[in-house]
Image: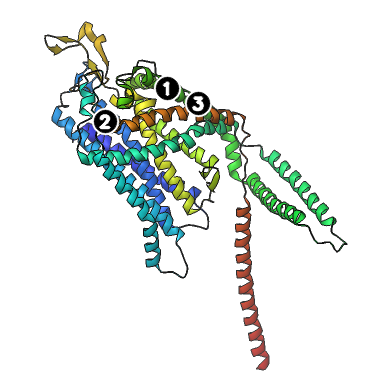
Amino acid sequence: MSAVEGVAWTVYGLIVASLLFFSIGFTRYYQHRHETEPFATSVTVIALTLVLATLALMPVDIFLVSSTVDYNTGLKKSWANPDKIFWMTLTVQIVYYVCYGLIALFSFFVIPFAYFYYEEYDEGGTQRDRIASALKFTSFFVIISVLLVLIGLFVKPSHQPPKHNIEWLEKLLLESSGEKSISFAIACLFLLGMLVFITYTAPGLSILPFSMIKGRRRIKAESEEVNSRLTVNRERQRELQAKYTGTNKILSKRDQRALDDLSDEERILTRRRSAIEEEEKSWMQHILRLIRPFEVIIGFLLLALTLIVVVSIFLTIIDKMMFSVCGSKCGYIITHAKIFNPINFIFTALQKAFPLDYIFMTLLIVYFFLATMSGVITIGVRFLWVALFQIRKHATMPQGLLFTTVILTLGLLALNYSLTAVVTPGYAHFGSQVYCNYTEGGLRNCAGEHADKIVPCDIYAPTEICTPTIASILIDRMIVNTPFFGIAFYYAQWAFLIVFVFGFVIALFRKPRENTHVLVSDVDEDEEQEGLLERSVGHHRDRYGSRQRNAEAATSSI
């Protein structure tokens, strides 16, 4: 292993370890205070770490292929012989396949099993019955995964000849049946991920920066509003009760429902007032006030980044539509960007000040993750218009955490495609590699006055100099061999832009966040906990009192 590879994999190991701690903190922050399940928690942590580690592999992939080229000559470095590059890229490919395989295992077996394992809890049942019941329901997902692999074995690759004779494009069609079936199953997960990418990431890219810019409501104004609503609520309850005071009338169903609703609202408002009073006294409020200016600045920077990313996506899909090598026949693959791409331009500029380009790629991945999470928290886990779970601090049920994990896993898989094929296609394919595009006497020589012939790599470049990243090979192979996915992914980007525009307008006029958020279920749960505590205390008092009475009786008898 060369020194470059050693540094790259050491850094990657440290990043994965950091992501593990991040996933643990993330899970503990959102998991329910009372309703926890160790197995579901462990699955959530491992699955999040796995998908983040897969995305973190992309900067390492780009770094390794970029390190093989000498930027001054546009030729391969002396140590980067074909054998060395083969083993280097093979290692990355194996890690990718392991990560994708584990993601498929978690998506089709481990996470569904953890969900049904929690659902099948029964105080009177045995552990064996619980596991058997969970496996019975999980078998449905296993059957789907097996069918996808079998279908992938029989899907014939596209042999439609492209308009240009490109060696790089032809190599994408060369793969074994095993690789083809695995890539088909992963492509199906990518397709599901596009739904998440459109539903949560698109609005999240607006929600996150605008929420930072607008901040939270002033806690004093929120307190005054809650007190005002409490006064109105109690006055309304008194009016309803006064209608029946001193009479023999029975509450009508309509008034009973109204009284019940007002009672629930009063409990929520009372709880909110208590939470606001606690917030006012907390040290966190003082810290938030101190960092508020920085939050606004970061919010505007993220908003600018969002707009640049969206413009890049729009320009790239226009580029794909107008200048694709073979259109829909090969999934709208483009030879090289003919329309200016702002993100690609930024990466090209940053590559001159290594390692800023790799840092920016890592930050971009993290930002997409946070945007997706922001969308999930705001929209909630839903099926169509039905809200299944709310994702909130210390109040997310184990099922909600597992659903969120699936959503984030699929969304980040879709991000793999978007980064590689749409957001920054040139950089994600070849990194910062360049090649000498001038030959003299059959040899490439760009020294001296021909230095301007050193140009960035694209898919027309000689494959003996320009090495594509493994991430781009896997995704492009998936698209070329099964153009249906390429077409679906392409039009999914248009849907992404449409949803983003709607989300941007809504986030623009959305009110600032509240400091507290309370539901009826929270109040019921707290009252239940308090009731259990009071019963426990009362039980101990009764036991203590009975002991004391027995002792007094014994003393008097003596």
Q: Which residue is pictured at 54% across the width and 40% down the height?
A: 379
Q: What number is the disc on residue 473?
A: 2
Distance in Å between CA atoms under marks 2 and 3: 32 Å
Task: Identify which residue, 179 or 288, lies in the foreground.
Answer: 179
Q: Residue furthest bottom?
A: 558
**Which secondary structure, mark 1?**
helix
Q: Is residue 155 above or below residue 551?
A: above
Q: Is residue 141 above or below residue 437?
A: below
Instruction: Tell me where residue 216 sits by quadrant.
Output: top right
Could you tell me if the residues under marks 2 and 3 are in contact, i.e. CB atoms within 8 Å? no
Which quarter of the image is occupied by the C terminus? bottom right
Q: Earlier in the sequence, mark 3 or mark 1?
A: 3
Which residue is identified by label 1? Answer: 312
Q: Which amino acid is tagged 2?
A: Ile
Q: Residue furthest left?
A: 441
Could you tell me if the residues under marks 3 and 1 are in contact, i.e. CB atoms within 8 Å? no
Q: Position of residue 468 (x, y in %)?
A: 25, 27
Q: Earlier in the sequence, mark 2 or mark 3?
A: 3
Q: What number is the disc on residue 301?
A: 3
Task: Identify which residue, 25 or 272, lies in the foreground.
Answer: 272
Which quarter of the image is occupied by the N terminus? top left
For marks 3 and 1, give the one nearer the viewer.
Answer: 1
**Which secondary structure, mark 3?**
helix
